[in-house]
Each structure stands twice: as C-alpha cells, then as structure tokens.
Image (cartoon, rainbow, N blue to C red):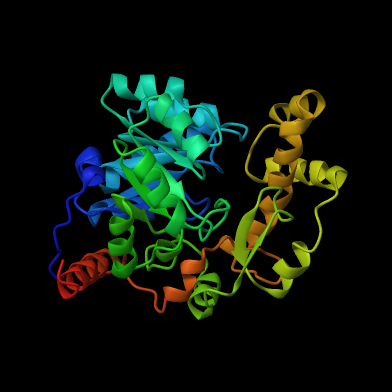
C-alpha cells in the first residue's frame, strides 16, 4: 500500500511523516509497539508509568535498537518515580518528552538544550495556557471521548477552542480518533495530528492481551463508562459487569491506601517512596492511593486479558474499530482514507 504524504506543523516539528501518535499507555506502549509506530511514520511514545528508572533506560535503548526514527516517552508527573524516569529520558536525549499532571518548566529547558521537543497533555484551556507559558513545543489536547483521563469537554469543542485561542501552538488531538475520517476531522478543527491510543492498542504489534483486544473490537461507542470511582480521577473504561460494579461507589480511602502498598510492590516501587507522602501530603497521596488500588485490575485486563476481575481503559473510538491489523496497515489506511475524503469533499 502506498503511503500518502500529509505534512503538518506536528510532522515538521517532530521529524515524522505521518501525523499519527501513539500515546503512552501503561503496559501497552512498550518498546515493540513504540518502534512499530515510529517505523511506520508516526510517533510512538513509551509509557514510563509502570517502569523504574533502570527499566526506563533499558526500554529507551531497546527502542533505539528497533528504530532510528523519532520517538518519545510519556510521564505523569504526579506519580512516584515519574521525575526519575524523566531524568533518565533527558540523560538519554530522547527526542520527545510528553508530560501530564505537573509543571514542565525544568523539562522544557533541559530538553531544548539538546534539541529535544516537549509536548504537554492537557484537558482544558487553563492547563494549555500554563503549559505554553512554560515553553512547551506542542499540546496533546485530550477530549471527553478519550480512554482513561479525558476532560469534561468533547474533542469536537475543545480542540477548535484551544486552536483558536493558542494559534501559534501545534496541537495533537486525542479522544475519539481511530481512522482517516477522524484525522481529517481533527485537521479541520485546527489540530495538526491525532493520537490514536485505542486504535493502536488493537494492532498486531500491541502487547494488549488478545482477549481484551477482542472485547474492544466487539464493543460499540456506547460500551464505556466514565466515572471518578475507579482510580480517583474521572476516567473512561470498558463497560463490563466488573467495571459496572467497581465504579458504583468510591474506594474506601483506607482500603485504597492499603492496596497502594501492594501495587507499589507489584511494579517494583519502593515503599519508602509511598509512605512519607501518605503521612505528609495526604491530599496528593489520597489520589495516588486510588491510582495504586486500581493497578492490579488494570494489569489483569491489560496483561492477562482477565475481564472478570480486571478493568480496561478504553476510548469511545472503540466503536470504529472492527479488526486487528498491523500498525503500518493502520497508518497507511488512515492517511489514504483522509486523502480520499478530502478529495471527495472538493476542498
């Protein structure tokens, strides 16, 4: 299949040929999938949330063994260990740093020193302006339709609003995009690229458990739940009997704190990084405890394909996913469909 050219501010900024991004998804955006997306012309972003600093370094080096194309790492700065992972990425001079839930001023300065680019993930104009003020090179604007922690406003409204108010900043639209129709729509809304997390999770190269891939392919856009009761932040998950039960009420804070210890052990995070925060920064650690309490269920669904116990983050774009194909095939088809529809529209 011939690849269609599609140059935007994001492709020029990041040195890629396709305006298609793999966002960092824990236990999914691993080196093989990251490299596959980058090799196919997009930008793969490594999820560092479950990784130690040492694992992050080895993952970065593995990606470089698999591709000589640009790639990135993602870090949720609120999480324990995130800053250490970012430090490793900066030491390794990773081309793109994508951060969320935190301030990126220092990251921007250190990345720019070696020619790296920084993308901030945001869900509101307030956060977008703050990120731009810190000097980021672009924004990943995440709408309500997205898997996991999308905002209150749909991509259809949020993307053009931020594009209009911050016209000099390149935008990656995230939330609801899975094909060429979505890419063309995002470009029309003022974005310069799309993030296709749920779509890329259901590819041949994705490590997502096969049973969970099949459940997503079988699902419709209505088969998700958006709730604050799973991990403490409003998040979108696959609708199952288990997720309906889990999101019915918030986790007891004491239970969440206890479970967070088990989650820390599960991902190799030393307890000394968790306990002081629980004692001195309860507001932040209350949120982290909820994250921790949800970890075992996320891993069960993502890694093991166990949807009887596990809960899977998923976007409403699952209703547009009908097959499991290779990353290259998805990217080529997306570009071709966008070009064809653009031509048909006569613009």
Q: Residue 62: tell me if it is visible.
A: no
With respect to residue 167, does 4 lie above or below? below
What x and y, as percent, mark residue 342? Answer: 19, 68
Q: Is residue 205 left or right of residue 198?
A: left
Quadrant where the C terminus sits is: bottom left
Q: What residue sits 76% from the left and 40% below the top?
A: 261
For residue 229, what is the image quadrant? bottom right
Q: Which sits in the foreground, 37 or 107?
A: 107
Side of 248 where 210 appears, left or right? left
Q: Quadrant of the N terminus?
A: bottom left
Q: Position of residue 205 (x, y in %)?
A: 37, 63
Q: Residue at x 49, y 52 (%)?
A: 25
- Residue 318 in view of the camera: yes
| Residue placed most toward the observer, 291 or 204 | 291
Residue 144 rendering spot, x and y as whole percentages: 53, 57
Q: Name the foreground residue: 47 vs 188.
A: 188
Q: Position of residue 158 (x, y in %)?
A: 46, 51
């Amino acid at each position: 299949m011939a690849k269609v050219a599609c140059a935007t501010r994001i492709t020029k900024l990041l040195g890629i040929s396709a305006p298609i991004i793999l966002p960092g998804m824990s236990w999914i955006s691993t080196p093989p999938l990251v490299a596959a997306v980058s090799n196919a012309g997009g930008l793969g972003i490594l999820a560092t949330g479950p990784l130690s600093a040492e694992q992050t370094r080895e993952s970065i080096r593995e990606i470089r063994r698999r591709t000589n194309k640009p790639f990135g790492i993602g870090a949720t700065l609120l999480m324990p260990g995130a800053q250490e992972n970012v430090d490793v990425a900066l030491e390794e001079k990773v081309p793109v740093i994508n951060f969320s839930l935190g301030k990126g001023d220092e990251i921007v300065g250190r990345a720019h020193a070696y020619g790296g680019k920084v993308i901030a993930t945001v869900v509101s104009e307030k956060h977008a302006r703050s990120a731009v003020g810190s000097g980021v090179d672009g924004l990943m604007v995440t709408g309500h339709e997205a898997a996991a922690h999308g905002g209150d406003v749909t991509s259809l409204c949020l993307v053009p609003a931020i594009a209009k108010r911050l016209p000099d900043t390149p935008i990656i639209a995230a939330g609801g995009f899975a094909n060429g129709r979505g890419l063309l729509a995002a470009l029309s809304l003022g974005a310069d690229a799309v993030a296709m997390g749920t779509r890329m999770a259901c590819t041949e190269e994705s490590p997502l458990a096969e049973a969970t891939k099949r459940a997503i392919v079988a699902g419709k856009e209505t088969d998700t739940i958006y709730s604050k009761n799973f991990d403490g932040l409003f998040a979108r998950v696959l609708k199952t009997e288990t997720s309906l039960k889990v999101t019915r009420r918030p986790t007891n804070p004491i239970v969440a704190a206890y479970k967070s210890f088990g989650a820390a052990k599960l991902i190799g995070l030393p307890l000394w990084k968790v306990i002081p925060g629980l004692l001195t920064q309860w507001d932040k650690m209350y949120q982290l405890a909820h994250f921790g309490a949800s970890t075992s269920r996320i891993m069960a669904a993502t890694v093991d394909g166990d949807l009887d116990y596990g809960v899977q983050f998923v976007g409403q774009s699952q209703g547009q996913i009908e097959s499991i194909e290779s990353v290259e095939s998805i990217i080529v088809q997306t570009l071709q469909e966008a070009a064809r529809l653009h031509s048909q529209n006569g613009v």
